[in-house]
Image (spheres, rainbow, N blue to C red):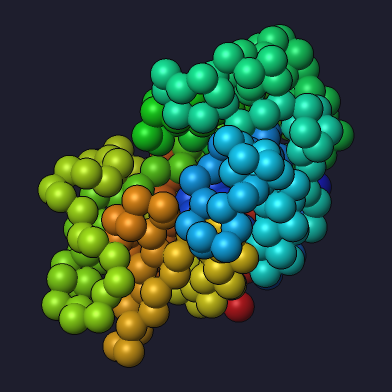
Amino acid sequence: MLTAPPRLLLVHAHPDDESLCTGGTIARYAAAGVQVTLVTCTLGEEGEIIPESLGGLAADHADQLGGYRVGELRAACAALGVSDHRYLGGMGRWRDSGMVGTAANKHPRAFVAGDVEEQTAALAAILADVRPQVVITYGPDGGYGHPDHVRAHEITVAAVAGVPDVLRLYYTVASQRATEEGLAALEGVGDLPFQLPEPGELPVVDDTEITTAVSIGDHLPAKLRALRAHATQVSVWQGQDGEHSYALSNGIAQPVVDAEFFVLAGGADAEADADLFGGLAPVEHVGADR
């Protein structure tokens, strides 16, 4: 049983990742009184901009997108109830590296080109300060192969290894079953503004790999508000029958489902499959919906 207050820390590569992957989880635990710390590794300077009116912010134009996304992230954190937000190494220390094989990979401040030991030390210092019991980041492939996601995984694993207060490390993943069911619900929608993905196009994992499914049904409104805050990167649609979907700049529909999914990567075995803190603290204190 925990004696210290429950603390959850998430390491994400860019603004909007926290809302896309873990927004409902953040909102649920924040509402339950857990101290939630979000660490963002870059400003997302290389993101593809959806609104045409903001196209001039892009990296190949004014290169001001990172600063704009700081405001988007601030609004998303407010929607989710994040009590402590930090940029790894300080705001702007490392830059969005872009996708694999792009020129942005070689930018002098690119996150993927940065010194791994320096980045790990910066994160370890935050972990030592916050002393979270539970940490969330991406799996070894970064979820879908983005270099910054992979680097975030690498430094998180390395930093957590040196902080004994961390009792569990989780990787955020997408459930194959939940994604397929969510897409099936969208197939009959006549006014869906997005294109449905081809089979296998969305990155998912087999549900046998998932150790923890966090119910976020009561906190979908907060997640949707956070997604809408990231308007340069995310378009959100809500159907008349309660369906929800979002799309990035590629216009491919992704369902918003009523749970978020995780793989326990290290630490104490989970005693419950619906609570990241299961067995570490009273369920009514950190896991119960409100």
Location of residue 107 in the rendering, given as x and y in whole percent from the top left corner: 63, 18
Left or right: 84 in relation to 167: right
Q: Position of residue 163 (x, y in %)?
A: 73, 24
**Residue 184 on image: x %, y %:** 16, 67
Q: Quadrant of residue 33?
A: bottom right
Q: In this rendered view, identify the residue nearer to me: 28 or 61.
A: 61
Residue that extends furthest to the right in the rendered view of this protein: 129
Can you see residue 197? yes
Query: Measuring 45% from the left and 29% from the top, which residue is drawn there?
Result: 99
Image quadrant assignment for residue 285? bottom right
Q: Is residue 4 above or below residue 46?
A: below
Residue drawn at point x = 39 percent, y = 74 percent: 237
From what the image shows, is residue 121 above or below residue 288? above
Which residue extends farthest bottom? 240
Residue at x 67% of width, y 34% of height: 41
- Please tell me which residue is depicted at 25% across the width and 80% down the height of the picture: 191
Q: Is residue 252 left or right of residue 3?
A: left
x and y, in percent, of residue 7 in the image: 73, 48
Q: How many discs appear?
A: 0
Question: Residue 242's quadrant in the figure?
Answer: bottom left
Whether residue 288 appears in this view of the structure is no
Rendered view: 219 above or below 211: below
